[in-house]
Amino acid sequence: MEWELGAAGLAVGMLIAVVTAPVGVSGAVFLLPVQLSLFAVPNPSVTPTNLLYNVVAGPGALLRYRRDGALRGPLMRQLVLGTLPGVVLGAVIRVFALPGPNVFRLLVAALMLPLGTWLIIRTLRTAPPEVQRPAPSSRTVTSLALAVGIVGGIYGIGGGSILGPILVGRGLPVSQVAPAALASTFATSLLGASTYALLSLGHSGSIAPDWFLGLACGLGGLIGGYLGARLQPRMPETFLRLLLGTLAAGLGALYAINALR
């Protein structure tokens, strides 16, 4: 029944967001396999549905971070500057050149599993201050955001799941990365969802979002994101880094299993 689907989407969205929002991950990348396997959302409409989730869920965490004064500094501008053009290009690639999810699963597994493991090890074995790596330059951050924006446009993920572990691993604190990554995710998802809606007007096939499911999951993410962002200041930096690394490694393992089935 439709109301059962909506309730399930609400619960899944809230559970994912409350865990991922403290480390700057919208949760869409974890929602993707749930949509494919549990909710049976067809390809490629699963991508704009994920973007719709981000648009609805994003303001919850952002509102809380704004109240805490965390939405400041140049990092957010650098991420948005790179991801916005990337998500449009990614949407076009997704519709016209790359309709299937199998390659994406393999890429996520190959990237996130070692990246998450590396972040966990690096957190547990903190190097002395004199050998700590410098923070990445603004040009590096913007270029990285552009690449992540393309991936996000193709597969409907905000990019925080990729940007977060890389930036935190390079020495930036989670408290700085998380709000900037979520703000970038919201902006790119809004543009990406609009791009898919426009492309659906002149393209046959299921490329429009599943509005009911996307809104239901997004409402759950709105609530869970606010709660997760409210909890973040009470969490130690080391715990947040380990949580981010564990989420990245777990995501990589999940996608590796799905890709090998």
Image (cartoon, rainbow, N blue to C red):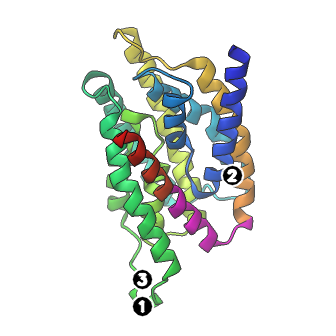
Q: Nearer the viewer, mark 2 or mark 1?
A: 1
Q: Earlier in the sequence, mark 2 or mark 1?
A: 2
Which residue is tagged 3? 132
Q: Which secondary structure, mark 1?
A: helix
Are circles 1 and 3 on residues that touch, CB within 8 Å? yes
- As drawn, the residue found furthest toward the left would be 97
Which residue is tagged 2? 66
**Distance from the alpha carbon under mark 2 to that under mark 1:** 34 Å
* Residue 35 lies in the magenta stretch: no
Are circles 3 and 2 on residues that touch, CB within 8 Å? no
Q: Can you say which quadrant of the picture contains the N terminus?
A: top right
**Distance from the alpha carbon under mark 3 to that under mark 2:** 30 Å
Q: In this view, does 228 lie above or below 131?
A: above
Q: In which quarter of the image is residue 118?
A: bottom left
Q: Give the range drawn in magenta.
A: 234-247
Residue at 45% of width from left, 21% of height from top? 45
Please say whether residue 189 is visible from this viewpoint. yes
Are circles 2 and 1 on residues that touch, CB within 8 Å? no
| SS assignment for the magenta stretch, majority | helix
Which amino acid lies under the numbered mark 2 shown in the image of this protein? Arg
Which residue is tagged 1? 130
Badge 3 crowding class, 10 Å Cα cut-off, few under 14, some 14 to 19, many 20 or more, is few
Residue at 71% of width from left, 44% of height from top? 224
Which amino acid lies under the numbered mark 3 shown in the image of this protein? Gln
